[in-house]
Every structure is written in C-alpha cells, then in structure tokens.
Amino acid sequence: MKIYDRPGFPNPSRIRIVLAEKGLGPQIEFVSVDLIGAEHKQAAFLAKNPSGVIPVLELDDGTLISESTAITEYLDNLHGHPTLTGTTPREKALIHMMQKRADDELIDPIGIYFHHATPGLGPLLQAYKSPEWADRGEWGNRQKAKALQGMRYFNQVLKTQPYVAGGKFSMADITVFAALNFADAAGIAFPEDCIALQAWRAKVSELPSVKNRSGQNFVPEDLKRLGF
Amino acid sequence: MKIYDRPGFPNPSRIRIVLAEKGLGPQIEFVSVDLIGAEHKQAAFLAKNPSGVIPVLELDDGTLISESTAITEYLDNLHGHPTLTGTTPREKALIHMMQKRADDELIDPIGIYFHHATPGLGPLLQAYKSPEWADRGEWGNRQKAKALQGMRYFNQVLKTQPYVAGGKFSMADITVFAALNFADAAGIAFPEDCIALQAWRAKVSELPSVKNRSGQNFVPEDLKRLGF
C-alpha cells in the first residue's frame, strides 16, 4: 500500500495515528506531496484525487481511496478487528456522528481560517483560493469564531464522557486531536475555559500512537519555507 | 425508535429510502419538526441535536444520533446484514469516500445556494443565516457553479461503473439522488450533457425503495407556505 501525504499536516497526521494504532506503518510506502508547492492542485495528483487534497491511500490493486474517514474505515477493518470505527451499530453511529461534527465544527472552519485569513501555505496556493475568500478576510475571520464554538461544544461533551464518542478512544478523537493541533498552527488560541477538553487533550497526547510522533512532524524544509 | 424529521426535505428523504431498503419503516415513530417555522433552531430541538439539523434518530434507550451518514450506519448494521455501507474494508472505504464527496460537492453547496441565494424556507429562518451570507448573495450564487461541477464529476464516475461507489447500490447513491432532487427544488437546472448521471438517476428512480415515495413527499401545508 502507498500513502500520498506530507508529514506534519493535519489530515496526514490523523492517518499516521491510525497506522500507529493498527501497527500498519511498516506496510506502507509513503509518497511525499509538496503542498507548499501546490503539487496537490496539479494534473498528476488530481488524477489520483479529483478533490485535490491529501492523504490518498493507493492499494496494491491500484484502487485509490481519499478522505481521511474512508481511509480510516479501510485500515481499521483491514484485519477484521475494528478498534477505531466501532463494532456495534450504536458505536459505529456515534463515532460517525462525532466524526462529522469534528469535520464540520473544527477541521473545516480552522482550514478556511488558516488558508483565507492568514498567509496559509504561502503564495503558490493563492490561485486556488475562491474569489470571494481572496477579497474577503472577514469570511475567514468568522470561521475562527466558529472553530472556538466547536471547541466549546466538544468541551461540554467531554465533561460527561472520557472520549469524544463515548467510553472508548475512536476515529472521532483522532480528528478532534488533529484539529486542535491545526488550530495551534493557525494561531487560534486554545480557550482557557475549556478545562475538560484540555484534560482530554493531555490524556490523548500520552497514548503511545500519539506520543510516538513518527512521521507526524513537519519536514525541516517545509518549516523553513513557512518561515519558522 | 423515533425519527425527528419532516417529509420532503433532502436529508429526511435519504433516511426514508434507507428505511425502505431495510424494511424498518414500521418500527419507526416519526416526529414532525417544523423547519419552515424554524423549530429546529429552538432550544427544545437543539437539546436533541446541537447542530440544529434534521433528521435525528432517538433509540429506545434515549441515545440520540444525528447526521444522515451516522443514522444510515446504525440502521444498515442493525440486524447484522449491511447492504448500504459495505461489508469488505474496500467497499466500506469507497462508499465513505463517495459519501463525503456527495456531501461536499453536492449537498453542501446546493444547501448554501438554496438558503442564501434564493428565498429558501422563508423569513423565519433569516435570523439563522450568517451575516456574511445575508449581505452577499454572490457567495451563494457561486455555490451553484460548485454543485454543477460536482454533478459533472459524478457523471464522469458513472460513465465507467453502474453505481456511485462501484458495482452495488449504496448509501452514496442515496445521497447523490437526494442531492439531485434538492437541486431541482432549489432551481438548479440539471446539466443536459450529464448523460450518464441522467441514466443512473432514471435507474435509481425505479428502485422499489425509491419509487414508493412513502413519507418522501412534502406535506401539503409546507408546499402552501413555500408558495407552491
């Protein structure tokens, strides 16, 4: 199996945690995609994923799977023992509900804020910003408020249960965790009043699959290009 | 089990098709939510789904499941014989990939266009439109172009395979089908050059779960309030 991604970026980091949880890392050949150079918006990559985003999983038979939720479903079910996407109908449903909320309330607005209200990944990606965003930072700025509201929602949830979708660590926790790291990188300050979310974040940080940051850190070249 | 929804609207129609496919309709008590009256944005409903959207599935133990994808996972797996969400890891992954694309490329932009560039569901919901949308129909109008691009993408897909996620009818077909009906209602003309998509749509229309429109038509009161 091949994964097209770039270390350090939010959605790739979700799949790197899934791979660590499932012990599948050694079976993967990683192919680096130059996001800062807008490689994911060029024809060669668009032939693999018309949506122009990473990560993409390519199976040995050539099947291409994109969208982190779909890749997680594949990897988690590969050996018949799902641990991140649920086993009972109720678990599957609650995990997919919280996964969708993590996308809609955190990952998406943080992404819009980062790409449209900050310098984002730099000038090479400017051409791929929608016109209404390019001339309207206000729209991006409002997304910051939406993301903060999303954090407060998850904080409420975590006041009464240990993990985002209930009693067990799941795909939805991985998405929320990656989203909070993305918010840090985008310059959205973590709200100090989100005590339960902060405690959950500290707990998740200590999980072996998360603490071992193999392939989760930015490559030095990218940090330099981003001005760090 | 209870489902909070309103007949005729796009996401409720997805779940009505799922129920018909699974033969589960008779086990459901439907509770009508007055969308045109903005009932889904009031405290009583927000306690059931903080995202303020329908449908919501309430299990007999009080568990609340929202987001159509999550509800479909529950209903499809309820009796241990999933037919709409895949059985192999590859099927699950491809269905979730296409489901996400149907959300992002069709349902979401059509929804934004309908609510923000047309009168939508009328004045009672105006208060729940984001400020940048209320003063900027242009943003909504661009979503129409995005939805048409999404239709062309699915048309390409359906040139080489019988259903949206491959060889079998799945959750992703239901979402694309509901999205095309939503586009009709929103006044987005079906692109005549999308021959494969049109042929697929005609085929899906004839499926028993789709053809039997039990609970899929608008209630007469709503049609009157919408000016039909």
Image (cartoon, coloured by chain):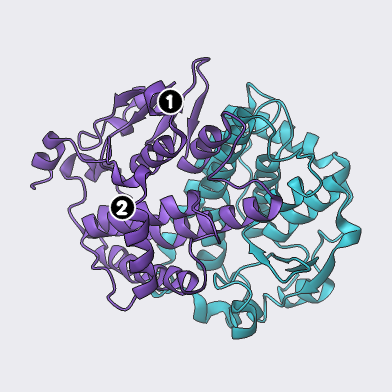
Chain colours: A cyan, B purple
Residue A16 in the figure: left or right of residue B23? right
With respect to residue B204, does A100 lie above or below? above
Local packing at callout 2 (Cα closer than 10 Å; few below 14, some 14-19, many 20+) is few
Q: Quadrant of residue A62?
A: bottom right
On what subunit does the disc labeled 2 rest? Answer: B
Residue nearest the observer in this picture, A191 or A147: A147
Where in the figure is residue A212, as x and y percent of width and height? Answer: 89, 50
The amino acid type, in three-letter code, at marker 1 is Lys
The dot on residue A219 is: none
Where in the figure is residue A15, as x and y percent of width and height? Answer: 74, 55
Residue B153 in the figure: left or right of residue B90? left
Separation (CA) of disc 1 from disc 2: 26 Å
The amino acid type, in three-letter code, at marker 2 is Pro
Q: Quadrant of the C terminus of chain A?
A: bottom right
Residue nearest the observer in this picture, A52 or B92: B92
Which structural element holds mark 2? helix
Work out whether residue B53 can be spotted: no
With respect to residue A22, does B36 lie above or below? above
Q: Quadrant of residue A61?
A: bottom right
Work out whether residue A19 can be spotted: yes
Residue B5 in the figure: left or right of residue A34? left
Which residue is labeled 1 in the image?
B48
Residue B146 in the figure: left or right of residue A80? left
- The residue located at (27%, 63%) in the rendering is B136
- The residue located at (29%, 41%) in the rendering is B212
The dot on residue B131 is: 2
Where in the figure is residue A51, as x and y percent of width and height? Answer: 54, 69
Of tags 1 and 2, the one toward the viewer is: 1
- The residue located at (50%, 30%) in the rendering is B65
Which structural element holds mark 1? loop
